[in-house]
Amino acid sequence: MTDTLERCRVVWGRTDRIAAPPALRVVTDAIYRPDIGTAPWNLTGPDGALLEGAGGSQAKAEACADAVPHLYLGALAAHYGHFLVGTLGRLWPLLDWRGPPPRLLCHATGDPAALPFLAPILAAFGLTPDAVIRFDRPTRIPHLVLPAPSLKEQAFAHAVHAGLVQAIGRPFWQNTVVDGTARPAYLSKARLVVGISRLRNEAALEAALARRGVDIVYPEKLELPDLVRLFSERRVVMGTTGSAFHTAAFAAPGRRILGLNWAPHLNANFPLLDALNHTRGRYYHPVGTESGPDEGFHFGWWVPDPDAVAEDLVHRAAHFDDLDAIDADQDAARRRIAQGPLAERVARWLRRR
């Protein structure tokens, strides 16, 4: 195995686990006001007390025509990853919902039905995207259920969030042979034209991995159930760090992930979501990686030796269950090199005393 990958040991953000459920309020005659001119949206109680959003607008509200309960989702994120670490955390009351199916109140700029991942997620609770509603005028809601989120990105996850993602994902993988395919799959972003980050020489890495027997998969081409099944069936899934890895939370417990990260520090969202389903994520920074601006993305990055990175990834996939020991040895070796010969001789002398 080449020494091209360095284990990401520093986490950017928090990964707090909270056993207690999030707060939940039931509000009678809540009032939702969308953006009106220069006034931002807000959600208030009948007395005008602010529940969500920003103060300012006190426009008169008309009564909601639908008397069924409304579950408040907040902003409906159109990006898959942002939905998983944002909007999804408001759905946890559906796990033990009693009574008539709710309407799902959100504020969004696009059509909820256009989000390809929304229908399979809501299907777990017997709902469809038609249940998601937006108000374009101030509206009084007779029965509003207002949950605090069960997950906040780079911060915390309540225990109930694990139950939420498992309830959504279980129907997708329960009839598959878990870990039935030993051949690794690599999740590529090479065909994306917009996004958060892009590995500029990913095509070269793909080719090197394919020569070594790794299947190349483009996750944006798969429906959510198919991607969940892939995570469940494959013994190891590889890729650059991104939203697709969050799908492992829906898959069979104990997934194995090998992630390439553009920096030595790792976004806390990855270990935060990994812990929900006992996912064993091992994330690495390719030595010598550089990054910079990239059109259509927040940034682009590249690795100096895609062939060596591919060789290292394949070896680590084959020895995944031993990676903690392998990486500890490599970390120790790097420290010895950094200390230099004199420091090593002093350390050996001190150990003999």
Image (cartoon, helix red, strand yellow):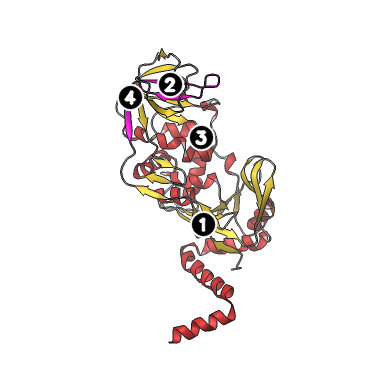
Report which residue position mark 2 lands on: 32
Dot in front, 1 or 4: 4
The structure residue drawn at horizontal position 30% and vertical position 43%, both measured from the top left corner, is: 20
The structure residue drawn at horizontal position 39% and vertical position 23%, both measured from the top left corner, is: 44
Dot in front, 1 or 2: 2
Report which residue position mark 3 lands on: 117
Question: Is 152 rendered above or below residue 2?
Answer: above
Residue 235 seen from this side: no
How far apart marks 1 and 2 lie (CA) works out to 51 Å
Pick the front one: 216 or 105: 105
| Residue type of the residue flagged with mark 3 | Phe
Residue 309 seen from this side: yes
In the picture, the quarter occupied by the C terminus is bottom left
Report which residue position mark 4 lands on: 27
How far apart marks 1 and 4 lie (CA) works out to 51 Å
Callout 3: SS: loop
Dot in front, 3 or 4: 4
Residues under numbered marks 3 and 1 in contact, where contact means CB atoms less than 8 Å apart: no
Dot in front, 3 or 1: 3
Q: Which residues are magenta?
A: 23-46
Structural crowding at the residue carrying mark 1, measured as other residues with C-alpha within 10 Å and reported as few (<14), some (14–19) or many (≥20): few
The structure residue drawn at horizontal position 46% and vertical position 34%, both measured from the top left corner, is: 120
Residues under numbered marks 3 and 2 in contact, where contact means CB atoms less than 8 Å apart: no
How far apart marks 2 and 4 lie (CA) works out to 12 Å
Structural crowding at the residue carrying mark 3, measured as other residues with C-alpha within 10 Å and reported as few (<14), some (14–19) or many (≥20): some
Report which residue position mark 1 lands on: 182
Task: Say if the magenta span includes residue 33.
Answer: yes
| Residue type of the residue flagged with mark 2 | Tyr
